[in-house]
Image (tube, coloured by chain):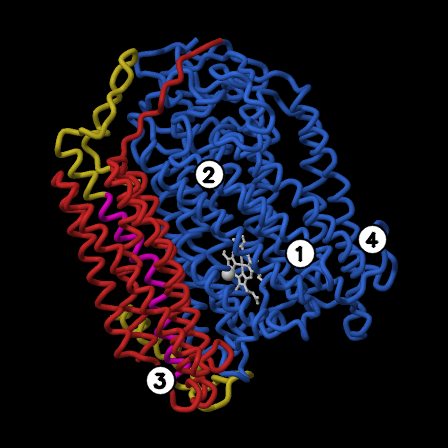
Chain colours: A red, B blue, C yellow
Amino acid sequence: MHFPVTRAPHREIVPNSVLGMLIFVGTEVMFFAGMISAFTITRAGSLPLVWSLPAGLVLPAAETAVNTVALIASGILMFVADRQRRAGRSGRAAGLLLGATVLGALFVLLQGREWWGLLSQGVTMQSSTLGAFFYLIVGTHAVHAVVAIVALGVAWWRLRQGTLSSAFFLGAQTFWYFVVGIWPVIYLRVYF
Amino acid sequence: MSAHAIAHEAHGHHEHADPGFFRKYLWSTDHKVIGMQYLFTGMFMAIIGGFTVYVFRMQLAFPGESVPGYGYVNATAYNSLITMHGSIMVFWVAMPVLIASFGNFLIPLMLGCDDMAFPKLNRLSYQIFLLSALVVLSTFFVPGGAFGGAWTSYPPLSASAAYNATPWGAPMWLIAVILEFVAFLLGGINFVTTAMNSRAPGMKMFDVPIVVWMIVLASLVFMGSVGPLVAGAIMLLFDQLIGTGFFNPNTGGDPILWQHLFWFFGHPEVYVVLLPAVGIVAEVMTVFSRKKLFAYRTVVYTALATSVISFFVWAHHQFIAGIDPRMAGIFTVTTLIISVPIAEMMFVYIATMYGGSIRLATPMLWALAFIAEFLIGGVTGIFLGASGADVYFHDTYFVLAHFHYTFFPIAFIGTFAGLTYWFPKMFGRHMNETLGKIHFWGTVVAFNAIFIPLFLAGAGGDHRRIFDYSAFPELASLQPLRQIATIALLVLIAFQPVFLFNFFYSMFRGKRATANPWHANTLEWAAPSPPPHGNFPEMPVVYRGPYEYSVEGREDDYWPQHVPPDDVTVDGPVEAPVAAGGH
Amino acid sequence: MTIARVFSATLLTLAAPGSALACAVCGTMGMENNSGAYFGMTIIMSLLPLCMMGGVVYWVSRRVAAAEAASMPHQVPAPSSVPTPYPASATSPDIA
Ligand code: HEM
Ligand SMILES: [Cu+2]
């Protein structure tokens, strides 16, 4: 017996990709919250000698402020890019999106330079508990940032080609806002 | 015959050329195939989990003797066996079967759509899950053997190979668990999005069958609680592999922290598996009582409340771990509160049966057994939830019996209720009722005979996780109880081939099933049995709630969700297995 | 008020066992900070997932209301061969 394949009616009250990404981001927030709460509790409970970085070193909070500004600026460019795209100006949107991607990449590169400096001073995951948490939390964030930047790059390429689907763009965008938004929390908690 | 439920025999795909075995069964994005993949993987893992429990219960009953089919059990092997038993049963049996298998099979069918919102993500979910199962199974064969730090994996035992003696098993176990969580994260995203966006036209929020609600809520609870455990697991992995000190007090770490991260997920997890089972029981209960579910909305709100409260109780697992006693007081109160909604659900189910025309078919027997057995599990939980009493009970066989009286009804009794009920839909054939009943009685009686002695042994002071009690002469009088439990376990295991035979025989040789053999209302019964690719010949439209049984003034005692109000015809003549119900 | 009295008595009783705090693994230094941090993080971690889910549900339900105010443009019309479902679905906020 044959019957025509009828597609099910999809009432996308919230686009599938946005809802799916929101749920995913919620899980990710809990993931970071778990690490940050572990950090807070361990810091409150451990003795200064085993906790601090070796030999009076401190985490480079001031230099990281620059990275932080770059990342937040990238988030703002992203927001504007979305506005432009919705208004139908995809040429401008592509430029802004490229800007957001480059600023995001800049953030990761500056982070990498910072890690290089710390490692050469002997700050490792084994050297102290603060060091371990630092690399764990900041490193996890960096992995997320790299994945998101790749997605943004793909989105930019597709936007220029005219093949960018709203679903992909909205999903990538939601994820990028998460990466940008969680960073100030990490920065304020871990570096100070 | 209703135009919407054409009971035709469906043989695989109609609209495509035969895609070949590999593409059809191993590389499919069809939600039903993925559901079956989860089901069969879960059944296979249950056999492994069952074998491990056979070996270590034999060791406990007859210490130091060679176990037939295994050999001598030494202390390290014992630890590996109990760890693998616990983790396999929770993470690789209960989770895949209850959530992933029933969720995948039922959600699109019950919502009246053709597939999940993200079919490829769904396929990826199963593939990651399969990988995780392979990783955890392979740890049986690595140097040092499978992980032996218990399913809760507390450091420092789990953090250092010097303590747990499983340098390979421990990190591989953690990796397997993380992979499994990723798989269920992808699955959960699918379930929630599908339930939100793909419901059939006319299906309002309160027309969604309870089991779908429950699986969606369970997925949300899972996703809200799993993050911190994954964070903790990564930290533990670093402790094991590169020697960081996250959980090592010597280097400023905090071992109690792991317990918080674990139980922050671990307690909600018990509700993650409980809710789908409760949902399955609701479906079976209404169909075999021919009655409307008592207080549908109350059940939904109760489940919602349970989900919320389940985030507030986790530290009841740590009462004697050295946590702040003031915190223990708070968690005692929240724990006692959470038993209220659970009790309420039980009352709702009993009220549903009251005055119904109950038919004791195999699925209904399982559903009734679920309520009776789970009640014992819940009531004993209240003793454990009182922090004062728990000082005595903690880590005894009383705790073990408590959670087996919750987990066994969930993972096995609930699953059997669901499998025997939906079998005709899944495979287009009926299971054998006589074999079903033999299997039911053998399993349920033996189950109680295992765990009632263990309640007594626990109350008598028997500690968990001890390899050989002959080192504790003061507990020697409890040996007969341990032996009764082990013998009852052998009986329980002996009855399982009855189910397996019935299942696989009926799959190919069982009596053919029509589209709606139980005369149920929900949409999956509007599709052919088994549903073809795309599910419905014509996408259904929903006109009413899922539990309109024995409606006053209707000739039939059921009223499917998709039948238009003016349509008085039914799905053909009433056939044998269903007694004419109603009153 | 009896309820208020019972409630405050319960709270006091809950605070009482504080002196029994004894942890086998931590030293005495930093203990106070540590249990304070546990309390704070316990509250944050329990409320965070619920707040996030609550937020998403609220946002989604607003979108549903908006969509339905614009005379249900998101509702795919029912197949022509069957009558339209009961119209209640168009008016009730349908959030799940
Ligand atoms: C009525 C609700 C429940 C209450 C009040 C309750 C209470 C408790 C308490 C206080 C403990 C800790 C005992 C100890 O370790 O000393 C416990 C252990 C446990 N419960 Fe429950 N429980 C309930 C329902 C459930 C359900 C529904 C499940 C499973 C689906 C479950 C599974 C477990 C498990 C697995 C453990 C032991 C974990 C371990 O130490 O390995 N409980 N329960
Ligand atoms: Cu619990």
Q: Earlier in the sequence, mark 2 or mark 4?
A: 4
The residue sitting at 55% across, 35% down in the picture is B418
Seen in the image, is A189 located left or right of residue B47?
A: left
Seen in the image, is A136 located left or right of residue A181?
A: right
Q: Nearer the viewer, mark 3 or mark 4?
A: 3
Q: Chain of mark 3?
A: A
The residue sitting at 39% across, 43% down in the picture is B299
Does dot 3 land on a helix, a strand or a loop?
Answer: loop
Q: Which residue is mark 2?
A: B122
Does dot 4 land on a helix, a strand or a loop?
Answer: loop
Q: Which residue is mark 1?
A: B84
Residue C45 falls inside the magenta stretch: yes
> Residue extending furthest right?
B65
Q: Which residue is mark 4?
A: B70
Residue type at mark 2: give it: Asn
User: Do the numbered discs 1 and 4 sit on residues whose CB atoms are within 8 Å?
Assistant: no
Q: Which residue is mark 3?
A: A58
The image shows residue B183, relative to residue A100, as above or below, that is above
The range drawn in magenta is C33-60
- Disc 3 residue: CB within 8 Å of ligand 2: no
Whether residue B350 is visible: no
Q: Nearer the viewer, residue B203 or B85?
A: B85
